Amino acid sequence: MLYPSIDKLLTIVDSKYKLVHVASIRSKQMLENHHFQMAENEYKNKRTIGRALEELDHGLIKVITHEDRK
């Protein structure tokens, strides 16, 4: 089973496409800057894409939509 659950993440982000987009951007940031929002031993995933999803699940990433910008 994958962690975190996609069904749980879709309650935070309204579409699968946006979820992939947000996770990929955060994953690239982790690779380039080596900046993690949680301690290394707190992550369950070893790869940055899984870690980005974990950060989203823990509420460490806020997704801003066009409606939020207005």
Image (cartoon, rainbow, N blue to C red):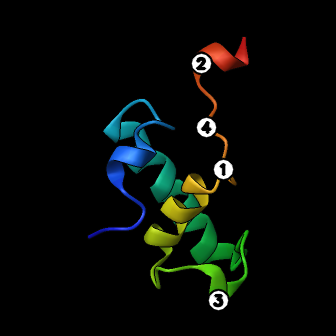
In terms of secondary structure, where does tag 2 sit?
A: helix
Q: Residue at x 39, y 67 (%)?
A: 3
Q: Up-down: is 50 above or below 34? A: above
Compute the Cα span from label 4 to label 3.
25 Å
- As shown in the figure, which amino acid type bears the numbered disc 4? Val
- Nearer the camera: disc 4 or disc 3: 3
In terms of secondary structure, where does tag 4 sit?
A: loop
Q: Are marks 3 and 1 in contact (CB under 8 Å)?
A: no
Residue holding disc 1: 59
Q: Is residue 42 left or right of residue 44?
A: right
Residue holding disc 4: 63
In terms of secondary structure, where does tag 3 sit?
A: helix
Quarter holding the C terminus is top right
- Nearer the camera: disc 3 or disc 2: 3
Quarter holding the N terminus is bottom left
Q: Earlier in the sequence, mark 3 or mark 1?
A: 3
Residue holding disc 3: 41
Binning the other alpha carbons within 10 Å of mark 1 as few (below 14), some (14 to 19) or many (20 upward) gives few
| Residue 32, quarter of the rendered image | bottom right
Q: Earlier in the sequence, mark 4 or mark 3?
A: 3
- Nearer the camera: disc 2 or disc 1: 1
Residue 68 image point, x, y percent: 68, 19
- As shown in the figure, which amino acid type bears the numbered disc 2? His
- As shown in the figure, which amino acid type bears the numbered disc 3? Asn
Compute the Cα span from label 1 to label 4.
10 Å
Binning the other alpha carbons within 10 Å of mark 3 as few (below 14), some (14 to 19) or many (20 upward) gives few
Residue holding disc 2: 66
